[in-house]
Amino acid sequence: MADLAEGDADGSGDDAGRTGREGLRGGLRGELRGELAAALRKGVRGDVRFGAADRALVTMDASNYRRVPLGVVAPRDAEDVAAVLAVCRAHGVPVVARGGGTSIAGQATGEGVVLDFTRHMNAITSIDPEARTAVVQPGVVLDALRDAAGAHGLTFGPDPSTHARCTLGGMVGNNACGAHSVAWGTTADNVHALDVLTYAGERARLAQGWAGLPERLADGLRTLVGSESAALRTRFPDLPRRISGYALDALLPERRTDVARAFTGSEGTLGVLTEATVRLVEAPRARALAVLAYADESAAADAAHLLLPHGPLTVEGMAADLVGRAAAAGLPEGAAWLFAETGGATAAEARARAEELVRAAAPATTGAVVVTDAAGQRALWRVRDDAAGTATRMPDGTEAWPGWEDCAVPPDRLGAYLRDFRALLRRHGLHGAPYGHFGDGCIHVRIDFDLLGPDGVRRFRDFSGEAAELVVAHGGSLSGEHGDGQARAELLPKMYGPDVVRLFERFKDLWDPDGGLNPGMLVRPYALDENLRFDVLPRRPLPVVFGYVDDGGDFAGAVRRCVGVAKCRETAAGGAGVMCPSYRVTREEQHSTRGRARLLHEMLAGEVVTDGWRSEEVRDALDLCLACKGCRSDCPVGVDMATYKAEFLHHHYAGRPRPAAHYAMGWLPVWLRGVAAVRGAPVVNRLTAVGPLAAAAKRLGGITPERTIPRLADEPFVRWWEGRGRGRGRERAGAGPAAGGADLVLWPDTFTNHLSPEVGRAAVTVLESAGLRIAVPPKSPCCGLTWISTGQLHRARRTLRRTLDVMAPALDAGLPVTVLEPSCAASLRTDLPELLPGDPRARQLAEKVLTFAQTLEELDPHWQPPRLDRAVAGQTHCHQHAVLGDTAERRLRERAGLVGELSGGCCGLAGNFGFEKGHYEVSAACAEEQLLPSLREARREDRREARHGDAATAVLADGFSCRTQIAQLAGDGPRARHLAELLAEALGS
């Protein structure tokens, strides 16, 4: 707390309304935090959280800024909000309202009390289909409202790319817009009435007219409008995306004195929203997407506004420097694209409108395509939705940041503006990839500012000032979607002039004379280069074990990958995504990928989380990380929390005892090899079948009592393989993996070798049926997975070095390595080269790893699998999804006549995670999200179809963890099997 006394901003204007900001930064200490927490717990029914972890989780939003709060309160209702305001007012503490925390200008952070509306105040109170309105609490996630309204054929028009996690309260605060604003406008255009509380505790219902306001506020606003009507009529640009400043012109009588509209976009500086009545629009029954390609960005920008007379729902633009090669491969040939969506009562009508757009645009385009299938449209929109994350890395891996994020110019000026903007970037030696709402003239961009050093920060400041002048010269608004916050508020005089900025200050003071709501935002702002979240990070790379090759070897650089867009907070079931299983169960921010990254950031900062690698706050947050690696693929910026967790555990337990589970399951390969060496599997199986002995073993091993210890195989796979070779008169495999002119090496991972050798035997049957010659390493190599997942990284390195020695003949021979266990394959692909970056053999082995299906597809593409012609259900392994991909598996299943989709999400067992004490409930809940319901539905379908004689649904799970979870939680259904087992069974019959 001592740091809060330093570094106050100069600000601008008079001293009115600065009490909360100055008082807090000037003198509050830890003892006040204790007093405040006690008072809040006494008067508030909701959650009052003032611990170090709770504060650390909300120090940042999705911006460049960081502010440390005193505490966080999750109110249960409007009465709770009033109680919080009363306590904070009595203590002179400011209040900041927060929704999904995805704001990009810094306005969702604060130094006083942060109100988290997502936990309790997230209800849709009512929907009136006739009036086309909905009443919602501020914490309602936009997609939840859209889903509920969709049952009536309606939707909420504004839809920012964060629609699956942003909240209605945040949208009102920032006047959010989204891709469909060319059709349905901004949030302000869709607000009917707002219920708010001022910092002084006054209740107000904002709509058109003065009637719902407290008398003193209504009188003050009338006076302001009457005395400044000329400025209000002439000084506010007429733009579809004017988000900067307060919308004071909405108070004019010719604009129906729309107080709700004037309040929308005020960034929590005027009052606290407790309920909103919003307008709904009719959702088109069918949609089509016209993708128009152009020779360059300027051509696309010049053409965008010409599409508007044709009534599109969206006109979104992006260029090749954002999209990248992989995504561009599915687009018509060009260097820039417009996504123009159309709607209709029927699919034919929507397509016809899209084709009309294509014809109208044809003279300027280099190609076009109309996409009508829903899956194809979703895939294309995903490129756009993820742009806020993907744009944070330049093609060469350089970090890029918001700051000059979302200005807007008149749509017909967009091409000229972008040409000037690109020139401005070049003058400053900067790079960025503009994209966004071309039809509205609104541009998003992340720029490769160096915000880690003083020279880079100065360049950031200088560029921002010149960019503001450029936008104003084109008749634009500094913000076209995300608000001013701290990033642009200092620059508002360039857009409006000092007189209008003083009007903003008067407006703020009428609502909040004590300055208690979100001080330092929008008026009397912090400087745009204050409170940068990078200032607190170490300037030199820490000594770490993983290589972090893509982050320059810097753990802090890896942690900085999380920019806060919070895709990990999405909770809708369904789809193939994995991230983030434990958050989807607990709904606790500390169990999201973003939350864990924030705690690691604060651990490196050392101000709130003070114990470094020994931090219990970080350990507790990472404890429920399943290390599923889902974030590695699903996070737009490629955060890899599984790796960060392993790194943290390595340092956290260095030189001191570990949890029992780390010894029991981290050293699993050693224990299993020992049992196999003495042929002790039958004895171990008999002992673990005795209840009291099994219970004692689980207690000693840190295993949750709800779990059954898996049986060991009487004959490990490698022993079977060696015996098979002797029985056929062949040489023992000890000659090495390259012996006998093999086509591939079959990797005998720990799980296949000791726990499910039937999978290995089945794979041999199938691979040999395809005419492939197999070698198996003479000494069972190890991928190091169990040591990595428990953070025993020195042991993992030693193990992997021995593995490379064992595999040297195969590497010299250039043989592919087939790995049946997805988690092991993923570890070899990703962890091996990161743990041994200086050993060229590590990268060589990683590049040779193939899955079972990839092996068949690449080594014998003409092999025809047996036809099974039956339905399948089951689980795609998380590591397969995140690292390996499953396209080859899908194609193989299709060729074998296996029909049906495997579950997305996570099975919840995740190696050692689901066995560890304290994890059972979360593990089972993860399985209940998608996997177990899909298996129950498959059984119901089997019962319905049984009278027709169809074969029962086969349960597929290539991962040992997934098969184990199904066996232990799915009841008496069919055994889950590896794809190799199904194919081998069919070959045998």
Image: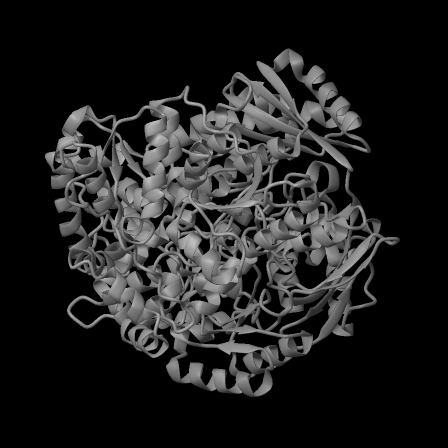
Name of the residue lying farthest toward the right: 130
Indicate the colouring scheme. Answer: one colour
Closer to us: 177 or 837: 837
Closer to us: 268 or 813: 813
Name the residue: 75% across, 34% down.
Answer: 286
Q: Is residue 862 above or below residue 734?
A: above
Q: Is residue 707 left or right of residue 682?
A: right
Q: Position of residue 145 (x, y in %)?
A: 70, 54
Name the residue: 54% across, 83% down.
Answer: 40
Q: Is residue 451 left or right of residue 191?
A: left
User: Count of labels shown?
Assistant: 0
Closer to us: 164 or 397: 164
Q: Is residue 46 among what the camera can see?
A: yes
Q: Position of residue 42 (x, y in %)?
A: 56, 88
In the rendered image, the quadrant that contains the N terminus is bottom left
Q: Position of residue 723 (x, y in %)?
A: 20, 42
Q: Is residue 588 left or right of residue 194?
A: left
Name the residue: 18% across, 41% down.
Answer: 837
Quarter assignment of residue 471: top right
Q: Position of residue 137 (x, y in %)?
A: 69, 64
Q: Is residue 255 above or below residue 852?
A: below
Closer to us: 432 or 281: 281
Quarter assignment of residue 849: top left
Q: Is residue 670 above or below residue 434?
A: below
Q: Is residue 471 among what the camera can see?
A: no
Quarter assignment of residue 494: top right
Q: Is residue 82 above or below residue 298?
A: below
